[in-house]
Image: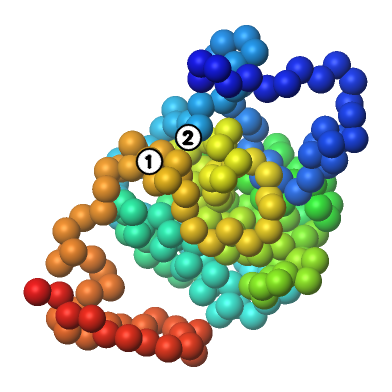
Amino acid sequence: LPGRRFEQVTELDEPTREKMNSARCGNPDTSPTVEGAALDEFVTGAGKWSTTNLTYSFQNYTPDLPQSTVQWAIDQAFGMWSAETPLRFRRVADGTSGDIVIRFVAGDHGDGSPFDGASGVLAHAFYPSNSGPIRGDSHFDEAETWTLNIPTGGGIDLVTVAAHEFGHALGLKHSADSSALMAPFYGGPRRFLSTDDILGIQSLYGGPGALENATWIHGNAALIEHPGNVESQRYYGFY
């Protein structure tokens, strides 16, 4: 972008070294198209799905959390993207081939991108532009300690990392906007999309559909999928 440049560092100073060693996503960053220029904020060019109704499945689960808790976390992560687009996500039976297959694996797990142990690379996902059944698949490093607790107590927030990886699975690359969920480095729990994330995903799939078509609206009733996780509830009318 005009007027925005990364500071050139010829020797690794301590802040640069610390950043390079920070926990991050394993997907590669997009190279600048102009020498010395920063990345665009949101970056597409990784393809998109031809349907807005996608399925997902679990190949396995992390032992760090109960299976139902992992499922809830993944639902929340997908929900961040469906709230801003016409995209809808439906879980199919474990072990089957959903459009997006979720795996918790460690080290070399057969996809050409081995994990590096605790910290470092946390997860990676395959773009819609990838050929074959691996496109969309999202892999999480089992060497990490996954949690839903805030504060995380040294663990890694599964909702935040999953939502980031699903951004890749939907066609977004890394963003240079440090406030974006799609920024490459993990900085702790971040369970919401920035304006940059929303603009990026809507450039691929458009904005959310009509309210009457939303899956969470049923007449005058508000259906809570996980009532045990809701502290309080307030009803508003639509006219």
Q: Taking 179 as reference, is 55 left or right?
A: left
Measured as percent of width and height from the top left, residue 147 is found at 69, 71
Is residue 135 visible in this depiction of the protein? no
Amino acid residing under circle 1: Leu
Asked if marks 1 and 2 touch (Cβ < 8 Å), the reply is yes
- 75 to 128, vertically: above or below: below
Q: Taking 142 as reference, is 139 left or right?
A: left
Tell me which colouring the rendered structure shows.
Answer: rainbow
Q: Which mark is residue 42?
A: 2
Residue name at image x 51 percent, y 27 percent: 40
The one of 114 and 170 positioned closer to us in this rendering: 170
Is residue 45 visible in this depiction of the protein? yes
Looking at the rendered structure, the number of numbered marks drawn on it comes to 2
Amino acid residing under circle 2: Phe
- 157 to 182, vertically: above or below: below
Q: What residue does disc 1 label?
A: 199
Measured as percent of width and height from the top left, residue 70 is found at 59, 72
Crowdedness near tag 2: few (<14), some (14–19) or many (≥20) residues, C-alpha within 10 Å: many
Give the quadrant of residue 161. bottom right
The one of 56 and 204 positioned closer to us in this rendering: 204
Measured as percent of width and height from the top left, residue 53 is found at 30, 55
Residue name at image x 22 percent, y 85 percent: 221
Give the quadrant of residue 202. top left
Q: Residue furthest front?
A: 3
Which badge, 1 or 2, comes first in the chain's sequence? 2
Q: Taking 224 as reference, is 18 left or right?
A: right
Residue name at image x 73 percent, y 55 percent: 141
